[in-house]
Amino acid sequence: MKKTEFFEKNEISLRFYAAKAIIEEAASLALSMRPSPGGPSATLKGRQDYVTEADRAVELMVYNRLSTLFPDDGFIGEERGEQAQGTYRWVLDPIDGTSNYARGRNRWCISLGLMKNDLPVAGIINAPALKEIFTAIRGEGAFLNGKPIYAAKTKNLDESMVEIGWSPFVPLEWWQEKTTAILNLGSMPRSLGSGALALADVACGRSDGYLEKVIYIWDVAAALVILEEADARISPFIKMGGIEKRTTILATAPNIASQLSKALGVELG
Ligand code: LIP
């Protein structure tokens, strides 16, 4: 291994392990702040678009910790946007699945991606209410609670399960068209409110595909490297402009990738 590769590998590993510990602390904070089951305890940013006190508290805590440890790194968060620039860039969704979190449900997570320039190099998705932590470092595999994970080997669409993400930015006609396409394939549909966890489910084989019409970089930055390391197929989200604007994403199990790509009208990388 060349000296430069050795130092880069260690720069990423150092950041990854420090961030993993910080996210575990943030996950405990978020869990302690979770509303009781019931109507949404949140502020509405728009129709069906929520933000909670935990979103703000987690983002501030993670930013403060990471900027202290790695002052030259960049940082983008869902709630406060870009707060710093740098070769290494942290991309955080402080609570992904906020609509679930705000009602006291379990399907939500903290999603933190590390990018070097525009390349995702490490990811951590921590879902404390589910007791699940998805992780990956580029070139070193993908894991769920420390055990290797891989996309499903599903070949028969009649056995497939495909999740489709919904947000207020999704036109009704698009939703109806794509849901019908999923059903016409013989797939079982799901829509569970967290894009990061939906992508993590494709990475570990719990589902065979995830489609969302428009999703942000902070929802997917951690999942992109986890999916790659788990041998899933993914649309070229970043080449499609996903860092700058909300963009379509499709992630699939490898053996049915071409059928899903064709039926859902999204090119894969
Ligand atoms: C959520 C995304 C999900 C989308 C939801 C929402 P948030 O992010 O993870 O993919 O369908 O509408 O945008 O707002 O919970 O961080």
Image (cartoon, rainbow, N blue to C red):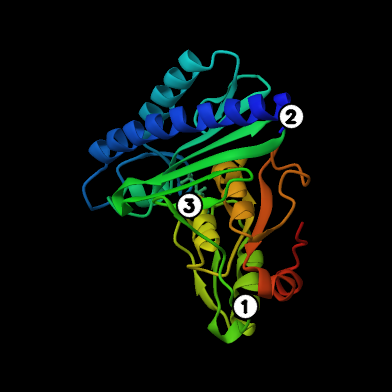
Quadrant (top left/top right/bottom left/bottom right) for the C terminus: bottom right
| Residue at the spot 75% in from the left edge and 42% down from the top edge | 241
User: Marks 2 and 3: CB-CB under 8 Å?
Assistant: no
User: Mark 1, mark 3: which one is toward the viewer?
Assistant: 3
Label 1 sits on what residue type? Thr
Lower sequence index among marks 2 and 1? 2
In the picture of the structure, the residue carrying the numbered disc 3 is 143
In the picture of the structure, the residue carrying the numbered disc 2 is 2
User: Could you say where residue 201 lies in the image, as x and y percent from the top left?
Assistant: 49, 61
- Does the image show residue 166? no
User: Mark 2, mark 1: which one is toward the viewer?
Assistant: 2
**For residue 57, side relative to residue 228 (left or right):** left
> How busy is the neighbourhood of tag 3: few (under 14 within 10 Å), some, or many (20 plus)?
many
Label 3 sits on what residue type? Phe
> How busy is the neighbourhood of tag 2: few (under 14 within 10 Å), some, or many (20 plus)?
few
| Residue at the spot 64% in from the left edge and 53% down from the top edge | 228
Q: The residue tagged with tag 1: helix, strand or loop?
A: helix
Q: In the displayed image of the protein, which residue is found farthest to the front?
A: 1
User: Mark 2, mark 3: which one is toward the viewer?
Assistant: 2
| Residue at the spot 43% in from the left edge and 35% down from the top edge | 20
Residue 219's place in the image compared with 38, above or below, is above
In the picture of the structure, the residue carrying the numbered disc 1 is 180
| Residue at the spot 57% in from the left edge and 70% down from the top edge | 208
Number of the label disc, if any, that sits on residue 216? none
* Residue 10: quadrant of the picture: top right
Lower sequence index among marks 1 and 3? 3
The CA span between labels 1 and 3 is: 33 Å
